[in-house]
């Protein structure tokens, strides 16, 4: 491993290391969330904007699934690669990186096929409105068929982060986000001679930005990631390497995929009450990503730091990684909660919604944000569990907070809302209950894992 990077990961004080690695990732993740919000704002102001927002909400679970599989695979690569480098097994690390590229090719082909053959059937399960149906199919088909940008960026981002090059991954993501934001109005509204493409323009702007991020991340990996050997021979699939990647990454994939399942389920529950409720929840979900993505960014710094220290069998650095990881995440979530409580109105007004839908969106933002502190604990501990080879514990947390304690509760509360949208706030309580109960379970699991895997070192 390159001496400078090895020294930073092995000797820099954990408190400082986590900030130096985490801040660039947090900035890039928050910008990612920002361009999701900007994307929706531009779409909302086109003709038929509220229907278009509803269409994007229906497409969103599949977009999240693409990210889930890409990032989940990347998490497995990140942890496996960091640990191999911590053990100074450079040849094994090169095989991990090469097999990650092979897996990216397979994942891309799967989503291309879904984009061609599966999109109509998927969208048809969530709406009977023909206008919303057509817009959702158009948008999602483009995103799936041209999915190689987001898939490969997710993998190369983790290859850079695993070796301490988080600044380079941030540059790549910021560049793609800026390109997306610039292209959105041009392609949606037909500016500067570009055809007026509507929701298709939003989709094309998104995939072009993703491709740009991938190309830049690939450039940095080839030019700057000297810690990892490169060559076509490493791309040859190795069953043992792939198995080890997914022993770590599969729980992360399932955890991320559960977000798609949860959103899909919530959409079905809410559409039974009102399409306005679906639109309001979809917009809230994008607004809250601005805060949750910051926590995810810090988690992406926690995981390689704790994993590298675990490979070194350094109890002190593992303990500090856990302590500062949870502490910094809580600070982010407290600030985020206060921000959304104060600015919920102005944020929701950006989308030009009808009075009822805007009111529902503000209500969702103010109530659900009260769950952020508990969500922060869950997110940080999931990253720690993955770093300590406890992917099953991470998966348990995801299943609890995004499935077991969400869909049944939301369905039950929706029965109380159905007579009157004035009671819609009851549904939003679901998320506070889910995150709180899950946080209690997560802390119990952390105490057990620390006793069995860290205290013994």
Image (tube, rainbow, N blue to C red):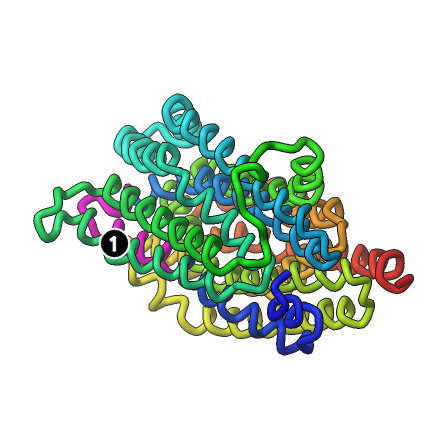
Q: Is 228 above or below relative to 198?
A: below
> Residue 56 at x, y = what percent?
35, 42
Instruction: Determine the residue positioned at 46% across, 42% down.
Output: 151
Seen from this angle, which residue lies furthest right? 456
Instruction: Determine the residue positioned at 44% across, 41% down.
Output: 63
Q: Is residue 200 left or right of residue 143?
A: left
Relative depth, front residue between 345 and 43: 43
Relative depth, front residue between 419 and 338: 338
* Quadrant of res 437: bottom right
Instruction: Determine the residue positioned at 39% across, 21% down.
Output: 117
> Residue 386 at x, y = what percent?
70, 52
Q: Is residue 202 left or right of residue 401?
A: left
Q: Is residue 333 visible?
A: yes
Name the residue that disc number 1 marks: 42
Q: Is 380 above or below relative to 269?
A: below
Q: Is residue 415 visible?
A: no
Relative depth, front residue between 93 and 151: 93
Say which quadrant the C terminus sits in.
Answer: bottom right
Instruction: Determine the residue positioned at 65% across, 66% down.
Output: 6
Say how many tags the image has.
Answer: 1
Relative depth, front residue between 416 and 199: 199
Q: Is residue 91 left or right of residue 264?
A: right
Seen from this angle, which residue lies furthest left? 193
* Quadrant of res 319: bottom right
Q: Which residues are magenta?
A: 34-52
> Residue 441 at x, y = what percent?
76, 54
- Asked if the magenta segment contains residue 263, the reply would be no
């Amino acid at each position: 491993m390159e001496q400078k990077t090895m020294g930073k990961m092995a000797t820099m004080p954990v408190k400082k290391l986590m900030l130096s690695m985490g801040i660039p990732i947090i900035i890039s993740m928050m910008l990612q969330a920002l361009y999701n919000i900007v994307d929706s704002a531009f779409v909302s102001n086109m003709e038929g904007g509220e229907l278009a927002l509803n269409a994007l909400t229906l497409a969103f679970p599949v977009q999240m699934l693409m990210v889930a599989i890409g990032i989940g695979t990347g998490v497995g690569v990140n942890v496996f690669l960091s640990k191999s480098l911590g053990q100074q097994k450079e040849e094994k690390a090169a095989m991990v990186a090469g097999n990650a590229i092979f897996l990216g090719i397979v994942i891309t082909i799967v989503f291309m096929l879904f984009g061609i053959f599966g999109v109509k059937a998927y969208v048809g399960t969530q709406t009977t409105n023909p206008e919303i149906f057509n817009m959702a199919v158009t948008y999602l088909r483009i995103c799936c068929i041209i999915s190689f940008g987001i898939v490969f960026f997710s993998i190369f981002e983790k290859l850079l982060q695993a070796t301490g090059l988080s600044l380079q991954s941030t540059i790549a993501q910021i560049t793609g986000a800026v390109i997306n934001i610039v292209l959105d109005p041009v392609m949606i509204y037909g500016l500067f001679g570009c055809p007026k493409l509507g929701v298709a323009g939003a989709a094309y702007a998104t995939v072009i930005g993703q491709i740009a991020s991938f190309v830049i991340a690939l450039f940095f990996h080839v030019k700057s990631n000297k810690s990892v050997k490169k060559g076509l021979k490493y791309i040859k699939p190795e069953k043992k390497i792939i198995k080890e990647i997914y022993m770590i990454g599969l729980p992360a994939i399932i955890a991320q995929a559960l977000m798609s399942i949860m959103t899909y389920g919530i959409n079905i529950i809410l559409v039974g009450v009102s399409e306005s409720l679906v639109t309001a929840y979809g917009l809230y979900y994008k607004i809250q990503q601005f805060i949750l993505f910051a926590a995810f960014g810090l988690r992406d710094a926690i995981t390689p730091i704790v994993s590298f220290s675990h490979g070194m069998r350094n109890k002190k650095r593992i303990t500090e990684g856990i302590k500062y990881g949870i502490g910094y995440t809580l600070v982010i979530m407290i600030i985020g909660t206060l921000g959304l409580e104060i600015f919920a109105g102005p944020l929701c007004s950006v989308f030009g919604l009808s009075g009822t839908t805007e009111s529902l969106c503000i209500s969702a933002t103010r109530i659900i944000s009260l769950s952020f502190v508990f969500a922060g604990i869950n997110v940080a501990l999931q990253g720690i569990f993955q770093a300590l080879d406890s992917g099953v514990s991470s998966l348990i947390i995801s299943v609890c907070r995004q499935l077991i304690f969400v869909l049944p509760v939301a369905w039950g509360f929706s029965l109380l809302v159905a007579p009157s949208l004035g009671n819609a706030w009851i549904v939003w309580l679901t998320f506070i209950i889910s995150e709180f109960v899950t946080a209690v379970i997560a802390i119990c699991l952390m105490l057990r894992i620390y006793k069995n895997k860290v205290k013994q070192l």
